[in-house]
Image: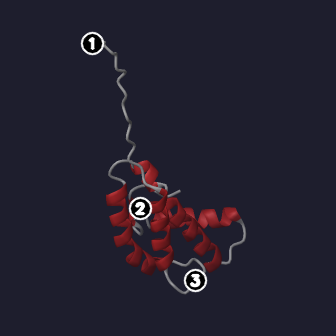
Amino acid sequence: MHNHQRKNKFSIFSAAISNTAKTFIREGVRKVFNPRNTQISLEGTAVKLNPKIRGWLNYYCKFNPRVAGNVFIYLNGLIRRWIEEKFRLRSKSAVQNKYNLLVQTNTDLFVHWKKGVIY
């Protein structure tokens, strides 16, 4: 009998959010929120989206919150586009300033803002 040395091999499992899940979340957001529709309020949008956001955060942030939270940066981009359309702002800095003011004065508006995903 030969004594074979076995090298220990370890698989590292990184439970991160899949691209399919990211697409699913983005599609879910877009079904509720179209930034070109300036007739809707952000408050109304938040009421519709917050239960979904809460569920997505609870499910996907269990293992790697930073990676999952990055998906909501997409939603923040849509909110910036809504601000741009709603207030007819054409400079990026004006849009960003309005967005920053909105986040600072309404931190509890969206669940992901409460969790610190504000970029």
Which callout, 1 or 2, points at the residue further toward the start of the chain? 1
Viewer-side residue, 119 vs 64? 64
Q: Which of 50 and 25 is in front in this view?
A: 25
Identity of the residue drawn at 30% across and 12% down: 3
Q: Residue furthest top?
A: 2
Seen from the viewer's position, the closer of residues 20 and 66 is 20
The circle drawn on residue 112 is 2
The quadrant the N terminus occupies is top left
How far across and how far down the image is residue 29, in percent? 47, 72
Q: Nearer the viewer, mark 1 or mark 2?
A: 1
- Marks 3 and 2, the one that precedes in the sequence: 3
Residue 83, x across and y down, in percent: 59, 73
The mark nearer the N terminus, 3 or 1, is 1
**Picture residue at 32% right of the left edge, 52% below the top:** 62
**Dot 1 lies on which element?**
loop
The tag on residue 38 is: 3
Amino acid residing under circle 3: Thr
